[in-house]
Amino acid sequence: MMPLDSIAVATISFLIGNVSGFFISKMISKNVKGFDQDQRINYLIIVVSLMWVASLIVDILSPQYETSPLVHGIMGAIVGFFFWKPKQQ
Amino acid sequence: MNMEVIKRHFAQERILYAMVGALIFLVVGWGVPDIYFKYFDKTNYVFVNQPVHVNQETFNRGDEIAVTLIRTSLIDTRGYVIVQLHLVNDNNSETKYPLADNEIAIAKSDHEVFYQKYLLPTHTPTGKLIPFGTYHLEAIISYDYRGLPKSYAWKSVSFSIAEKITE
């Protein structure tokens, strides 16, 4: 894939992910009671972890695909960052 | 922005959690596929439909033999092929004679047809005439996948090397 094509696909995927996440979050907030900040963070952690597991599986199953170490690191950093909860004062 | 909010969100502990998370995901993300491919992966990424067919049933010493290879490759890679001529002896043991070896470029493909020609030897490496009898070709394709050596062997149908009577 040409670099420009890769950038275009990555940008479009990012935007689709952003917009989908925004609308899904709104929908869940409306229909689920008590969907607060903490719940959102927990769902974010679960989604990112599931995406990471999926990338591992595709890494093994597809001969052409190899997940970049940077992607592993970023996903782990996101999970770790949001896993920490500030102490209640 | 409120400094307290920033301090709260980027507490040292939180940064530490992020770094530990990154490290764990990195190690597991690199380690799991690496262990799988090293110890469990038995996939042939390059393979050939077998048995491999040759163009004639009987050849003379020094004749050209043409093999038809129908090759599938799941990856783009470079490989090394070693082809040997196997004589099947009366007691079912085999005597091997080198035929050809060369480096090849392997492109991702699905049932790609190749015609490969080899020159049958007239003499053994020790200088004697190649004996008449039943032969077949065997080849090993060696290549790398994710830094790990892999190989695939193919075998041709049997054919004879005999004195051909030309009409």
Image (cartoon, grey):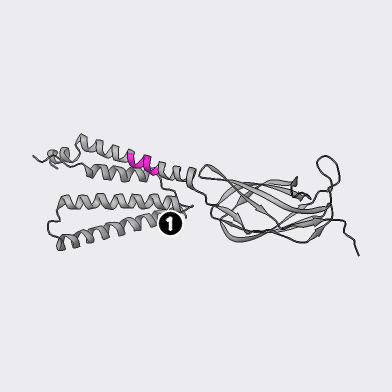
SS label for mark 1: helix
Q: Position of residue A2 (x, y in %)?
A: 47, 54
Q: Position of residue A35 (x, y in %)?
A: 15, 56
- Identify the main secondary structure in magenta: helix
Packing grade of label 1 (10 A; few <14, some 14-19, many >=20) is few
Q: Is residue A31 left or right of residue B140?
A: left
* Depth check, front residue: B36 or B1: B36
Which stretch is magenta? B24-29
Q: Chain of mark 1?
A: A
Q: Is residue A42 left or right of residue B28?
A: left
Can residue B91 be seen here? The reply is yes
At label 1, the amino acid type is Asp
Q: Position of residue A39 (x, y in %)?
A: 17, 52
State yes or no: residue A79 in magenta: no
Q: Residue at left 22%, top 45%?
A: A82
User: In which quadrant will I find the C terminus of chain A?
Assistant: top left
Which residue is most to the bottom?
B167
Kindly indicate the quadrant of the structure image that contains residue A24: bottom left
Q: Which residue lies under the disc numbered 1?
A: A5
Q: Residue at left 26%, top 42%?
A: A80
State yes or no: residue B28 in magenta: yes
Q: Position of residue B150 (x, y in %)?
A: 57, 46
Q: Residue at left 76%, top 49%?
A: B91
Can residue B98 be seen here? The reply is no
